[in-house]
Image: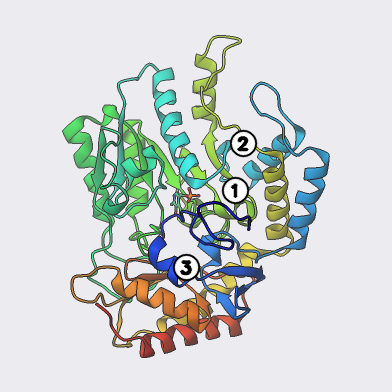
């Protein structure tokens, strides 16, 4: 690292880290210096297992040479080209490959650089769609408590995680929030809860209050991931879809975590057999190698917006310098090719019972309050210490790291979501480290 007048060489200080206790971290850093497959090595050379696929990004494992080669080739051939009024071939190839993987009715892909950008793009698409239909008065959005839709201004406005919003005094107006579906009434229930489909009627209630014809879109994570794996009750998503259709409201599935095989099928839309109008994606789109997101839209949304614009006009006034970046497209194509060639979504499905059984072996541990899971994703909720929500989770996450496991925590819930290439013995090892850490780390205030 270069010397600077204000910071010593090798100082950790200048990097203002995201979603991190910067002051604490810099006293006691946890750095991943190397990663391969399911394994990580910290800066002291100690090996860890990756229990959360990074941040749910890398189902095919870290440092895949096929992706590295594709990125290298693309960097040499065409390292950047704009996608505003000119284009480059690989983005079209990628859009075609991606849309073939998406649910049948989702025929168009708009590229972004992250999940947050995908969410804000989807908000704009919904507004543009209704305006193009002559329904510009539809400017209300609905999301859910305990939702996470990224950190851009649209996303935090939709967010049901109050701490992500409370510091920032300005958010979008006209957002209504319906309840999440997690009641806690049936802890340790594997898969979809049997009770709770009627939570969808909250949406009908909002349609009565505001008029269904004022609502532009409903944003739903089919399984709320970042707030601890909240699996939708049987029949819930079906009812949400029905109400949206009845009122002409667009249904947006935020599949940033649930997409690309995490639940054992291509997308949550396939697993639950519900077709959204718009889908947001990121993370596993490139196996986490290069930042990229995408928004999938159905023909109705695309055609309505494009055909409403006069000839020779830009139809959708939106885009990023790096939308459809050629190198990200190369990484995406190589990632999708690996998923297909190695049958990784099927492997995720095959591993699911083993993985969930392993997680459920923690049932009965005195510190485990609840377990939730679907596919290769599970929430392990530990008892909070007094009223200090999240203190346990943070202490445990740090201890797990030192004991050889990277596990993402949110509040007091760990989210385990291993890579689809994980071996059963590695799953056992992860759960073993988890259990031993729970045994050893004292409940902290
Ligand atoms: C459902 C959902 N939407 C959006 C995002 C934001 O994605 P990013 O961090 O890539 O901006 C996330 C990130 O975890 C997510 O889980």
Kindly indicate whether the residue at mark 2 contacts the one at mark 1 (C-beta within 8 angstroms): yes
In the rendered image, which quarter contains the C terminus?
bottom left
Residue 335 position in % (x across, y down): 69, 55
Label 1 sits on residue: 291
Residue under the image location 42 percent in, 74 percent down: 397
Please determine whether, in this image, residue 217 is positioned above or below residue 25.
Answer: above
Residue 92 occupies which quadrant of the picture?
top right
Q: CA distance from mark 3 to mark 1?
A: 22 Å
Residue 377: which numbered mark, if any?
Answer: 3
Cβ atoms at labels 3 and 2 below 8 Å apart: no
Indicate if the residue with disc 1 has its beta carbon within 8 Å of ligand 1. Answer: yes
Q: Check disc 2 and report the residue beneath it.
A: 322
User: Does residue 154 appear to the left or right of 313 in the view shown?
Assistant: left
Element under disc 3? loop
- The residue positioned 52% from the left and 13% from the top of the image is 309
The spot of residue 343 in percent (x, y) is: 68, 64
**Colour setup of the view:** rainbow
Q: In the rendered view, tell whether residue 197 sits above or below residue 393.
A: above
Numbered disc 2: secondary structure: loop
Dot 3 or dot 2, earlier in sequence? 2
| Horizontal side of residue 116 vs 148, given as left or right | right
Q: Nearer the viewer, residue 439 or 309?
A: 439
> Closer to the N terminus: mark 1 or mark 2?
1
Cα separation, mark 3 vs mark 2, equals 30 Å
CA neighbours of label 1 inside 10 A, class few (<14), some (14 to 19), many (20+): many
Q: Residue furthest front?
A: 5
Q: CA distance from mark 1 to mark 2?
A: 10 Å
Q: Quadrant of the N terminus?
A: bottom right
Rendering coords of residue 170 (x, y %): 28, 36
């Amino acid at each position: 690292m270069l010397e600077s007048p204000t910071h010593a060489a090798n100082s950790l200080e200048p990097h203002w880290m995201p979603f991190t206790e910067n002051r604490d971290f810099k006293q006691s850093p946890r750095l991943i210096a190397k990663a391969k497959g399911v394994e990580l090595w910290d800066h002291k050379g100690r090996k860890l297992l990756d229990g959360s696929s990074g941040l749910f990004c890398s189902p095919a494992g870290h440092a895949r040479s096929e992706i590295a080669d594709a990125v290298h080739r693309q960097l040499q051939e065409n390292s950047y080209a704009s996608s505003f009024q000119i284009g480059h071939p690989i983005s079209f190839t990628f859009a075609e490959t991606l849309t073939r993987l998406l649910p049948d009715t989702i025929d168009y892909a708009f590229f972004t650089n992250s999940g947050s950008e995908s969410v804000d793009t989807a908000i704009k698409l919904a507004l543009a769609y209704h305006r193009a239909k002559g329904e510009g008065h539809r400017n209300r959005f609905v999301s859910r408590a305990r939702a996470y839709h990224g950190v851009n201004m649209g996303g935090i406005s939709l967010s049901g995680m109050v701490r992500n919003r409370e510091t920032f005094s300005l958010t979008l107006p006209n957002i209504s929030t319906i309840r999440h579906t997690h009641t806690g009434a049936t802890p340790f229930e594997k898969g979809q809860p049997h009770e709770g489909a009627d939570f969808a009627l909250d949406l009908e209630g909002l349609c009565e209050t505001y008029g269904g014809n004022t609502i532009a879109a409903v944003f739903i994570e089919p399984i709320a991931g970042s707030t601890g794996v909240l699996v939708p009750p049987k029949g819930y998503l079906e009812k949400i879809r029905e109400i949206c259709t009845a009122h002409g409201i667009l249904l947006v599935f935020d599949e940033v975590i649930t997409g690309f095989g995490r639940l054992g099928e291509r997308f949550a839309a396939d697993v639950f057999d519900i077709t959204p109008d718009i889908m947001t994606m990121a993370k596993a789109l490139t196996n986490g190698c290069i930042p990229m997101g995408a928004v999938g839209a159905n023909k109705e949304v695309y055609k309505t917006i494009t055909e409403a614009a006069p000839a020779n006009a830009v139809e959708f006034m939106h885009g990023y310098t790096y939308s459809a970046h050629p190198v990200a497209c190369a990484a995406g194509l190589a990632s999708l090719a690996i998923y297909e060639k190695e049958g990784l979504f099927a492997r995720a499905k095959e591993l699911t019972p083993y993985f969930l059984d392993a997680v459920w072996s923690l049932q009965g541990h005195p510190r485990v309050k609840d377990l939730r899971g679907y596919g290769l994703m599970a929430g392990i909720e530990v008892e909070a210490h007094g009223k200090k929500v999240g203190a346990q989770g943070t202490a445990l996450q740090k201890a797990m790291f030192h004991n050889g496991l990277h596990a993402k925590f949110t509040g007091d819930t760990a989210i385990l979501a291993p890579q689809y290439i994980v071996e059963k013995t590695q799953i056992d090892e992860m759960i073993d480290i988890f259990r031993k850490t729970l045994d050893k780390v004292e409940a902290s205030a």
